[in-house]
Image (cartoon, rainbow, N blue to C red):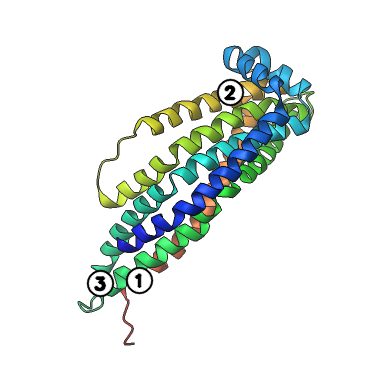
């Protein structure tokens, strides 16, 4: 507990500097987009079916990249703001998981040591691979937009779409903006919900999480509309690229799970059998 508190306090000064840097970058992105962005955004919100396809054709590739990058930037700011809270929730998860595993250790002497060692390892890994890399969320969102857009474009070609890859990506950029923001708003709740699965405590979404869910769902709806409008295909035909996307995402998710789960099981087994005297 004291270690987690110290880590959270140490992050404060760094986070303040990051907020300033990210705020400047966000302001520069808005300046680069200009007034056209706000006009387009208003049209996307009020009449998505009539505007997404048009913006996909009229917006240049650089303009679309900045839109997606801006969404990732906002998500990054939101997640960095909640980084200390995410660290606390994940620490609770680590304590619950490692504590349960340590109870199965045959040695009464080493149970507490095994649990503490496991908690430290899990917290360090979460900090190393997640908390310390939140600043790279904008780049990750741009890469996802490009990769998933390419997969969707291949799917639209199967049903005879005449659209270019650039046009389709432009139509999906605004959806990715909302999806990124929604994910950023939900980030703390996601970690808290994961912790709740181990602690057994019910976790209800707060106001920010509910807003994130609404924005995320709206972004997904925009993605589906943008996919059909940008590719100039019907709603029925858009089922093909959607299915292709789901297959790829599901396959990658299963691959990641199949690789991570055995390693996590080995980690827990190490806690159950922890005995430094051997």
Q: x, y percentage for residue 36?
A: 71, 20
Q: Quadrant of the N terminus?
A: bottom left
As drawn, the label of residue 242 is: none
Mark 3 highlights which residue? 112
Judged left or right of residue 49, residue 89 is: left
Mark 2: give few (<14), some (14-19) or many (20+) Cα within 10 Å.
Answer: many
Label 3: element kind: helix
Determine which quarter of the picture holds residue 278: bottom left
Position of residue 126 relative to residue 228, above or below, is below
- For residue 271, say whether it is visible: yes
Instruction: Please give left or right for residue 47 compared with residue 129 in the image.
Output: right
Q: Can residue 232 be seen in this snapshot?
A: no
* Secondary structure type for disc 2: helix
How crowded is the residue under tag 3: few (<14 C-alpha within 10 Å), some, or many (20+)? Answer: some
Depicted 5 relative to depicted 141: above or below: below
- Picture residue at 60% right of the left edge, 45% below the top: 21
The correct choice, above or below, for 243 with respect to 127 in the image is above
Query: Which residue is tagged 1?
Result: 117
Circle nearer the viewer, 3 or 2: 3
Q: Which numbered disc, 3 or 2, marks the residue that appears first in the sequence?
A: 3
Q: CA distance from mark 3 to mark 2?
A: 50 Å
Q: Position of residue 228 (x, y in %)?
A: 66, 21
Cβ atoms under marks 1 and 3 closer than 8 Å: no
Residue 222, which numbered label? 2
Query: Which-is-in-front pick, marks 1 and 2?
Result: 1
């Amino acid at each position: 507990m004291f270690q987690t508190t110290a880590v959270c306090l140490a992050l404060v000064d760094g986070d303040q500097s990051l907020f300033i840097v990210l705020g400047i970058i966000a302001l520069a992105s808005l300046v680069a987009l200009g007034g056209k962005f706000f006009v387009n955004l208003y049209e996307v919100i009020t009449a998505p079916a009539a505007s997404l396809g048009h913006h996909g054709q009229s917006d240049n590739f650089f303009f679309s990249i900045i839109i997606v990058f801006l969404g990732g930037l906002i998500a990054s700011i939101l997640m960095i703001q909640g980084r200390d809270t995410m660290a606390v929730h994940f620490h609770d998860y680590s304590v619950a998981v490692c504590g349960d595993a340590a109870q199965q250790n045959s040695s009464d002497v080493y149970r507490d040591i095994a649990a503490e060692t496991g908690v430290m390892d899990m917290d360090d890994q979460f900090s190393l691979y997640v908390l310390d890399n939140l600043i790279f969320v904008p780049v990750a969102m741009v890469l996802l937009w490009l990769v998933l857009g390419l997969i969707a474009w291949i799917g639209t070609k199967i049903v005879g779409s005449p659209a270019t890859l650039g046009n389709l990506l432009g139509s999906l950029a605004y959806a990715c903006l909302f999806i990124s923001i929604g994910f950023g708003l939900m980030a703390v709740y996601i970690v808290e919900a994961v912790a709740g699965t181990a602690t057994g405590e019910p976790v209800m979404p707060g106001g920010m999480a509910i807003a994130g869910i609404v924005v995320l769902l709206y972004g997904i709806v925009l993605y589906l509309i943008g996919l059909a409008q940008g590719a100039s295909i019907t709603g029925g035909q858009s089922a093909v690229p959607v299915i292709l996307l789901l297959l790829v995402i599901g396959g990658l998710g299963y691959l990641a799970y199949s690789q991570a789960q055995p390693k996590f099981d080995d980690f827990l087994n190490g806690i159950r059998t922890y005995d430094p005297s051997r």
